[in-house]
């Protein structure tokens, strides 16, 4: 009787067998939906958006006191003319000074809106893509 002789497999064969098993496992996992191949996740920038509108806001500044307002507070020293009558204290109103500010409305990529106010004229226009960083509006390049 001849003893049975078992041949050892070549190490390269073990590597090929392992690779085939690994490939089959990944393929099975992909077909069963265990791997996220088809699910693309899109990152949403919560600070990015588009300028919807830019509005100029005129705010009247405090007007200086008129001569009549000053005379009401100081009746004892109201000026009089030679006949002893008070001259006309109603002076024509000075032009009202206004302070300009600018309100920018931004529609963010996630659908919300924000309104920002600033004293300087903006460098952006409606439909420009912008990004808000620490309350500052930056034009996206």
Image: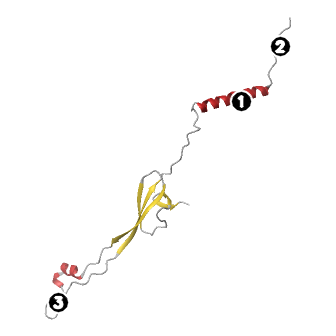
Identify the image quadrant of the N terminus.
top right
Q: Which of the labelled discs sits on residue 104, or is there none?
A: none
> Distance of mark 1 from mark 3, alpha carbons?
111 Å
Find numbered disc 1 in the image and state the secondary structure of the residue it sits on: helix
Can you say whether 64 is above or below 53 in the image? below
The residue closer to the viewer here, 106 or 70, is 106
Q: Which one is closest to the eye, mark 1 or mark 3?
A: 1
Q: Earlier in the sequence, mark 1 or mark 3?
A: 1
Q: Quadrant of residue 66?
A: bottom left
The residue closer to the viewer here, 124 or 81, is 124
Label 1 Cα neighbours within 10 Å, binned few <14 / some 14-19 / many ≥20: few
Q: Quadrant of residue 38?
A: top right
Q: Residue at x 18, y 85 (%)?
A: 78
Find numbered disc 2 in the image and state the secondary structure of the residue it sits on: loop
Q: Residue at x 13, y 94 (%)?
A: 83
Query: In this figure, which residue is indicated by the disc labeled 3?
Result: 80
Please say if the residues under marks 1 and 3 sit with CB atoms less than 8 Å apart.
no
Query: In this figure, which residue is indicated by the disc labeled 2?
Result: 5
Residue 19 rendering spot, x and y as whole percentages: 71, 30
Find numbered disc 3 in the image and state the secondary structure of the residue it sits on: loop
Q: Earlier in the sequence, mark 2 or mark 3?
A: 2
Identify the image quadrant of the C terminus.
bottom right
> Distance of mark 1 from mark 2, alpha carbons?
28 Å
Q: Earlier in the sequence, mark 1 or mark 2?
A: 2
Can you say whether 4 is above or below 47 in the image? above
Q: Residue at x 26, y 78 (%)?
A: 65
Q: Which one is closest to the eye, mark 2 or mark 3?
A: 2
Query: In this figure, which residue is indicated by the disc labeled 1?
Result: 19
């Amino acid at each position: 009787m001849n003893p049975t002789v078992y041949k050892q497999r070549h190490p390269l064969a073990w590597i090929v067998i392992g690779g085939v098993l690994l490939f089959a496992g990944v393929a099975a996992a992909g077909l069963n939906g265990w791997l996220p191949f088809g699910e693309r996740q899109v990152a949403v920038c919560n600070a990015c958006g588009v300028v919807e509108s830019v509005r100029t806001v005129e705010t009247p500044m405090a007007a200086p006191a008129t001569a009549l307002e000053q005379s009401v507070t100081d009746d004892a020293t109201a000026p009089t003319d030679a006949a002893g009558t008070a001259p006309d204290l109603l002076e024509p109103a000075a032009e009202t000074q206004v302070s300009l500010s600018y309100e920018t409305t931004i529609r963010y990529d996630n659908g919300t809106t924000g309104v920002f106010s600033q004293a300087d004229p903006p460098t952006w226009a409606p439909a420009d893509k912008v990004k808000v960083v620490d309350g500052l509006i930056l034009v996206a390049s």
